[in-house]
Amino acid sequence: MKNDKKTILSGMRPTGKLHLGHLVGALSNWKKLQDEYDCFFMVADWHALMSEYERPSDIKKNSLEIVKDWVACGIDPDKSVIFVQSMVPEHLELAMVFSLLTPLGWLERCTTYKEQLREIKGRMLATYGFLGYPVLQTADIALYNADLVPVGIDQLPHLELAREIIRKFRGLYKADIFVEPEPMLTKVSKLVGLDNRKMSKSYNNFISLSDEADVVKKKVFSMYTDPKRIRADIPGNVKGNPVFIYHDIFNPDTEEVDDLKKRYAEGKVGDVEVKNKLTNALNVYLDPIREKRADLTDKEVMEILSSGAEKARQTAKRTMGKVKEYLHQMVS
Ligand code: TRP
């Protein structure tokens, strides 16, 4: 069924509900890619388990929630293959093969690994499985022979490792399968958090896609603005001001935004008006997403996922069949 479209694979770990940062950073891009590419979008539950293995209870729930978010944002199960990693066992099979030929040094040197060991507190991550995180990610990509992998900049070390592992497989077995995948970097920069810090779950400084209208309002009114502007008649700074960054992205009424910016810079508008208008814009933006999300039942999501897994497995099995041929020891 291979056509001349290039293949895309990307994934997210099911660690909780998605927020505006995911929408701006990844989902709006995924949505556009669906028409031009053969897309595989994967819930990386094994990857989540690598850090959550001590308390795995939320992974299934989070997997269903994340797929609801995806579909509500326009990821279309009729256009793209939406699936859960653990429902396609070939991921682990290919990861095993790649683990055989990946030198420990490559993994130990990986900057994301070193950083997470250092930064993530309260979890024992010095495990064999966690060290192999990029090996499984390579299998995710290679199984579908993805040409392009849309990721954030933080994932580049993993993509580089994937290319190296694939190159090594091709060299060792004179194999003519697996293209070297290219990262596809999202153009928009990261959305800043409500408090002007990096948006992060642990700072609780984000708006979830499923937040109700009144929660959105409360969060917008808690937003950081220009700290020097203690009164509305003091001229304020628009540039780098989170309220205006959000207006620029989510408020389609550019005239309104320009007018607010002008008056803000002149000290002629209060924060309340700026924030009320942002609340409205965000709620108009989120309304259809929330509606679509609320309409999706767990049963429907399960149906999407079983048909996704079935489609994914067709390709995955074919790839594993070829891999086993190259390793001719295998009886199959
Ligand atoms: N490591 C990615 C992340 O944390 C998730 C992921 C798993 C992924 N497998 C992938 C992304 C394959 C792209 C391709 O965001």
Image (tube, helix red, strand yellow):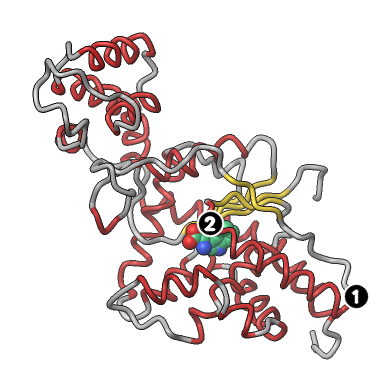
The reply to whether residue 330 is visible in this rendering is: yes
- Disc nearer the start of the sequence (1/2): 2
**What number is the disc on residue 11?**
2
Up the image or down, 151 lies above or below 232; here it is below
Q: Quick one: which residue is furthest to the left in this view?
A: 231
Judging depth in this view, the residue of 226 and 22 nearest the camera is 226
Q: Which residue is drawn at 56% across and 73% down?
A: 110
| Residue at 50% in and 82% down | 129
Q: Is residue 58 above or below residue 289?
A: below
> Considering depth in this image, is 238 or 78 the residue closer to the camera?
238
How many marks do you count on the picture? 2
Q: What residue do we see at 18% from left, 22% from top?
A: 276
Going by the numbered disc 1, the residue's amino acid type is Lys
| Pair 1/2: label in front | 1
Q: How far across and how far down the image is residue 274, in percent?
A: 21, 20
Q: Can residue 84 be seen in this view?
A: no
| Lateral position of residue 173 relative to residue 35, left or right | right
Q: What element carries label 2?
A: strand
From the viewer's perspective, tell me whether residue 48 is left or right of residue 294.
right
Give the crowd class for mark 2: few <14, some 14-19, many >=20 residues within 10 Å. Answer: many
Residue type at numbered disc 2: Gly
Q: Which quadrant holds residue 308?
A: bottom right
Q: Residue 25's mark?
A: none
User: For disc 2, does the CB lie below 8 Å from ligand 1?
Assistant: yes
Across and down, in percent, residue 131 comes to: 52, 80
> Residue 304: image x %, image y %?
51, 51
Identify residue for label 1. 174
Secondary element under disc 1, as helix, strand or loop, is loop
| x then y, percent, for residue 305 | 51, 56
Distance from disc 1 to disc 2, alpha carbons, whole Å, reads 29 Å
Tell me the quadrant of the picture where the C terminus can be found: bottom right
